[in-house]
Amino acid sequence: MTMQFADLARSVSADGEITPHEVLALRRLGWGDGQVSPGEAEAIFAINRAITRPSGEWVDFFVEAIGEFVLNGSEPRGMCSEDEAQWLMQAIDQDGRLETMAELELLVRVIERAQNVPESLKHYALAQIEAAVLTGTGPTRCGGELSDTHVSGAECRLMRRLVFASGGHGPAAVSRFEAEMLFRIKDATLAADNSPEWPRLFVDGVANYLRGFTLTNAQLSYERMKELERFIGNDRPSVGRFMGAMAREVPQAFNHFGKVFGRKPDPVGFTELEASGNLVTENEKRWLDTMINADDEIDALERALLDRVAADLG
C-alpha cells in the first residue's frame, strides 16, 4: 500500500465523507500495479465502515476492489479459499452483523463471479438475507425503516442471484440448505405483503432442488482446483498422453464447469432417470412431504410448487 493511498484512506475515515474525486484517486492508487494488496483491502473496508452516506461510485469501487482481492489475489484465480472466505466474513462482521448494502452486494458479487466458494461463505451470505427478511431489518431495507416481516423485491433479487449463482452449488443448482431456507421464509411470511417476485422465486428454487440439478452441476472445491492446476501445469509427455487417452476412453467426462463432453444417452430405467435429475427420488418425496406437512395444510405457494413438480414429471 502506497503512502498516498494510506493518507487518503485515513482522511476519508476521519470525516466519514468521500467525493467522486477521492474514489477515483483510490481506484488509481489501489490498482496502479494491477492488483489489490492485503493492506489496501483492509483500508478499503475501514473506509466503508466510516462512510456515513456511501455514493454509487463508492459502492461500485468497494465491490470491485474487494472482489478482485478475494477472487484474484492468489492462485487459482476465480476461486475463493476457506482462508479468504474467513477473512471476508470477519471483515464484514466485525461488530457481529453485516452493516451496509455495499457489503451485501459484495457477498453476492463474489459468489456470482467465483467458479466456487466454500460452504461457509455460501451459508453466511444466505443467512444475511434470511435475517433481513425475518427480522425486518438490515441493509436490504435501508437501515430497517420497514419493520414488517415480508419479502421485498430487493431481497427477492438478491436471493435469486445467490441461490442460482455460478459459485454456489453449481450453475442453476439449488441445494437442500437453500430449499429449506426458502421454506422457512415462506412459512414466516405467508400473510405478509410480499413482492410479486417472491412466489416465482420460491417455486423455481424448490422445484430446482427437487429436479436434482446438483447431481450434474457439482462444483470443484478450491483444493481440488489447485490439485488439477498442478497436474495440468505438468507438461511432460506422459501427462499429454494420459489426457488424450482419457478423452478417448471417457468422452463424457465432466470438466470443471460441470458440463459434459458429448451427448448423454437417453435414460432407460428408474435408476437412470433418477441419476439424470428427471425424477423426484423417494428421499426427495419424503423431504417434500415433511416440509409441506409441517403446518398441517397446503398453502397457495405449496400448491403452486406441487403443480410445477407434476408438470415437470409429466
Image (cartoon, rainbow, N blue to C red):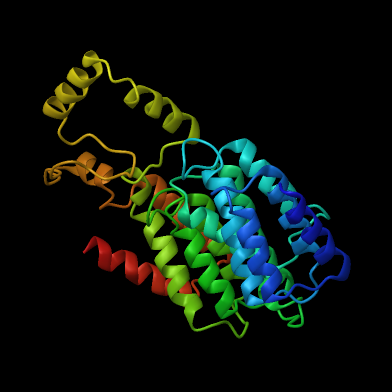
Position of 298 with respect to 120 (left or right) is: left
Frontmost residue, 172 versus 113: 113
Frontmost residue, 7 versus 42: 7
Frontmost residue, 286 versus 120: 120
Most extreme residue toward the right is: 14
The quarter holding residue 97 reads: bottom right
Is 83 above or below relative to 4?
Answer: above
Residue at the image position 13 percent from the left and 45 percent from the top: 263
Looking at the picture, how far across and down is residue 177, in whole percent? Answer: 53, 51
Pick the quarter of the image with the C terminus: bottom left
Residue at the image position 28 percent from the left and 20 percent from the top: 235
Q: Is residue 107 visible?
A: no
Residue at the image position 71 percent from the left and 69 percent from the top: 22
Position of 129 with respect to 210 (left or right) is: right
Looking at the picture, how far across and down is residue 5, in whole percent? Answer: 73, 55
Looking at the picture, how far across and down is residue 124, in whole percent? Answer: 64, 52
Frontmost residue, 50 versus 125: 50
Q: Is residue 22 visible?
A: yes
